[in-house]
Image: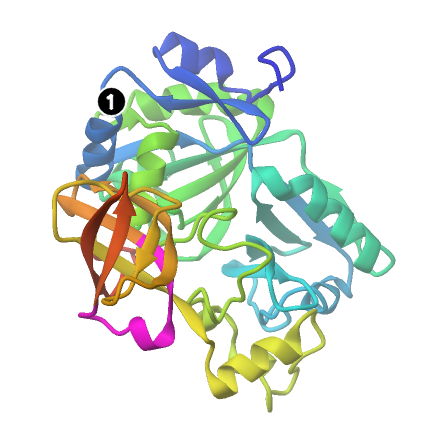
């Protein structure tokens, strides 16, 4: 895709004004970093508040009395019992239990709001329309942008625009007027820090972003810092750590499947791949996602092969970096369950060198969500 064909978010001109280095990402021209650099942006988010443009993500509205039950036919998540003003993490699955996309689901007074990955939104819309388009109305909210304000001082900064946002707790949401615009705000994000995701009319996005950047705590951050932050938080990136060949149980995401949707639950099954996922809950998967810490300073990147103690192929790395906060090489990958216990040692192959890595629990940096 040429630069001329790339889509632009409503904040494109602001990114250029702020000196961002733009790169192609999921069909959009997106800021990977600003002049301060990825490490500085990462550390600022951990210490204060960082503003991310995530307007490339898809925002989809489901409307109708049957919308929640209809959506439950595509996801293994409890949507029916989700209260108004609450949000839940979920995923679309395929017939073999693989993950088509992961998403956020928020219940509002009159609809469900889904936030899906940019690279998957066209396929997700087709999936929704094909399977449940006859049961509810499905609308792509192409006229809205999405901003993420993340970090321990995000609430202080945002509350100056509307004090009411401070009442939200983790995974709660509501409508708030911010900088003169009606916004749907959730206390959530993908950095492991406290923070907010703000759905704002596209025409008002730049004004809101400027109002936030005027707050003393807030600095802009790009995709580079977003990636290192979510990796330190042990959070999956679709297309890397999870995909159509990976089930939620293998990915360590079984916590997102509530008991009511599991075997024996009141609304068990009824979604694609339920038999595979229920069998893995019952008997365990053959391999699983693990956290890895490098015992040498060299970073280990996505795609590196993992070898067991005998030098036999055991798995692969799906995400890796030198963690700016963890201050050591960190990675996620998949290993057979007999190699996946914390404390075990495997070797990553990097430029024909075998680098030792220890299996560790995740997250690499503790979550600091505001649970009220």
> Which quadrant would the N terminus be assigned to in this image?
top right
Viewer-closest of 135 and 271: 271
Residue 352: x and y, percent? 27, 42
Way the structure is coloured: rainbow
> Which quadrant would the C terminus be assigned to in this image?
bottom left
Residue 135 covered by magenta stretch: no
* Residue named by callout 1: 37
In screen coordinates, is 70 left or right of 115?
A: right
Viewer-closest of 242 and 314: 314
Residue 106: x and y, percent? 56, 55
Q: Which residues are magenta?
A: 332-344
**Which residue is at 49% across, 87% downward?**
283
Residue lying furthest right in this view?
134
Viewer-closest of 263 and 14: 263
Mark 1 secondary-structure assignment? loop
**Which residue is at 78% across, 58% downward?**
64
**Which residue is at 44% across, 25% downward?**
208
Residue 138: x and y, percent? 76, 48
Residue lying furthest bottom in this view?
264
Residue 123: x and y, percent? 71, 44
Residue 342 covered by magenta stretch: yes
Corner quadrant of residue 5: top right
Residue 122 visible to the viewer: yes
Viewer-closest of 179 and 41: 41
- Label 1: how many Cα within 10 Å (few below 14, some 14–19, many 20+): some
Image: 101 above or below 254? above
Corner quadrant of residue 311: bottom left
């Amino acid at each position: 895709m040429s630069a001329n064909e790339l889509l632009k978010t409503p904040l494109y001109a602001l990114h250029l004004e702020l000196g961002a280095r733009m790169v192609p990402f999921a069909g959009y021209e997106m800021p990977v970093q600003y002049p301060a650099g990825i490490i500085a942006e990462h550390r600022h988010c951990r210490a204060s508040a960082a503003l991310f443009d995530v307007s490339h993500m898809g925002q989809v509205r489901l409307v109708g009395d049957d919308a929640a039950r209809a959506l439950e036919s595509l996801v293994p998540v409890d949507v029916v019992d989700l209260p108004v003003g609450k949000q839940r993490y979920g995923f679309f699955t395929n017939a073999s239990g693989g993950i088509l996309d992961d998403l956020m689901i928020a219940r509002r007074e009159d609809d469900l709001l889904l936030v899906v990955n940019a690279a998957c939104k066209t396929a997700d819309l087709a999936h929704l329309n094909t399977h449940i388009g006859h049961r509810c109305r499905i609308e792509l909210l192409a006229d809205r942008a999405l901003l993420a304000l993340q970090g321990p001082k995000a609430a202080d900064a945002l509350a100056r625009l509307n004090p009411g946002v401070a009442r939200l707790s983790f995974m709660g949401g509501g409508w708030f007027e911010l900088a003169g615009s009606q916004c749907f705000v959730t206390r959530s994000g993908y950095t492991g820090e406290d923070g907010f995701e703000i759905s704002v009319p596209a025409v008002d996005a730049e004004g809101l972003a400027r109002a936030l950047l005027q707050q003393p705590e807030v600095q802009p951050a790009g995709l580079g810092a977003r990636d290192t932050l979510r990796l330190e938080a042990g959070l999956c990136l679709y297309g890397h750590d999870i995909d159509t060949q990976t089930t939620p149980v293998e990915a360590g995401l079984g916590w997102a499947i509530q008991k009511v949707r599991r075997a024996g639950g009141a609304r068990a099954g009824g979604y694609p791949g339920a038999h595979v996922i229920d069998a893995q809950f019952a008997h365990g998967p053959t391999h699983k996602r693990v956290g890895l810490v490098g015992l040498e300073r060299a970073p280990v990147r996505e795609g590196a092969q993992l070898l067991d103690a005998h030098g036999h192929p055991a798995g692969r790395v799906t995400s890796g970096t030198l963690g700016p906060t963890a201050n050591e090489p960190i990675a996620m990958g998949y290993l057979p369950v007999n190699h996946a216990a914390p404390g075990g040692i495997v070797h990553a192959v990097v430029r024909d060198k075998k680098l030792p890595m220890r299996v560790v629990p995740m997250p690499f940096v503790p979550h600091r969500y505001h649970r009220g």
